[in-house]
Image (cartoon, helix red, strand yellow):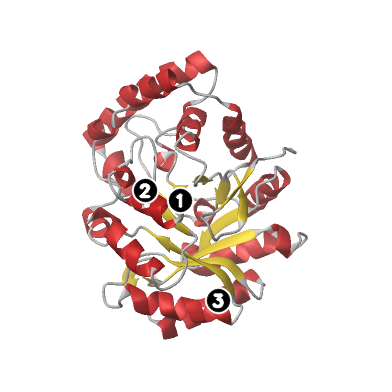
Amino acid sequence: MTKNLSTVQLGKTGPVTARIGLGAMGMSGMYGQSDEATSIATIHAALDSGANLIDTGDFYGMGHNEMLIRQALADRKREDVLLSVKYGALRGPDNSFGGNDTRPAATKNFLAYSLQRLGTDYIDIYRPARLDPNVPIEETIGGLAELVQAGYIRHIGLSEIGAGTLRRAAAVHPIVDLQIEYSLISRGIEAEILSTARELGVGITAYGVLSRGLLSDSVKAGQQFAPGDFRAHSPRFQGENLTANLQLVDALAKLAADHQVSVAQLAIAWVLSRGEDIVPIIGSRRPERWAEAVAALDIELSETELAAIEAAAPADRVAGTRYATAMMAGLDSER
């Protein structure tokens, strides 16, 4: 598949990226088992389509995701790819999460391992996965700025932080983008965070555009998820919450049918319509799913059609929070 994707600059100080990027998290077990050969084929399909931004985290599969990406990029030119890496999440051998550590010394340590696993001498965008409550954001950004000066990272990004924290961070060093969940049914950033990012010239890389598969044809009523699948612990996918949320998806499916597109494509097109400073990160795990996502770039929606989409799936009718209670408590963006 070859397609000339349109490009945008990521924030006012960032690199040029294709209009959509590939999120690799699901290739390392976060949504159940995945096949490495298929995952690599998906990465190749994304690059061959004209995409250049690949997003990962050093804690995805405890390094597995980065090593998978290294394998996939072995025959590609490094300069043709933008690697976005999240760090700081502490993991246990039982797959548990143990908080975050973004001290400058810890940041250097995380980075050293990522560079080795990815087989590169620099990372394009490096970002703490979450705000560390024990480290002032100014200290974290100061440490990252030193790594920019040393050439180990090209740009600094952030993830799931609130408007006030974003202002404090940007006062220390330019921030190219804020990676945060944004979808038709997760619209919390519209209250304050999005306007603040735009004021500061910070781009948005939107993850969860398909709400972890909810806004697609892959989730069914009463579906049971494997214990290691994120959705097995996500409130939106449990019992009556899932039933209620699938009613919203059914309403969207009727509108999608009118456009002769899938619900997933309609959901991606809606996020794309929010502004060129928003780059959706699509977590495809198979080449055909990536092709489906790329096709969403061709969908044009009028203001009337956008209003109908939002009326079919009002954000205030979504049942359940986007993370379990303990994880929601750690989101600076939700405070």
Q: Which residue lies furthest to the front in this view?
A: 199
**Circle 3: residue type:** Val
Residue for badge 2: 194
Residue for badge 1: 204
Residue 210 visible in rendering: yes
Q: Which residue lies furthest to the top in this view?
A: 258
Residue 35 lies left or right of residue 101; in this view the side is right
Distance CA(mark 1)–CA(mark 3): 20 Å
Q: Residues within 10 Å of mark 2 (few under 14, many from 20)?
A: many
CB-based contact (under 8 Å), mark 1 and mark 3: no
Quarter in which the C terminus is drawn: bottom left
Quarter residue 115 falls in: bottom right
Q: Which mark is residue 174?
A: none
Q: Which element carries disc 2, helix, strand or loop?
A: helix
Measuring from the top left, give residue 127's x and y in whole percent: 46, 66
Measuring from the top left, give residue 88's x and y in whole percent: 41, 72
Measuring from the top left, give residue 254's x and y in whole percent: 42, 16
Q: Residues within 10 Å of mark 3 (few under 14, many from 20)?
A: many
**Circle 1: residue type:** Ile
Residue for badge 3: 148
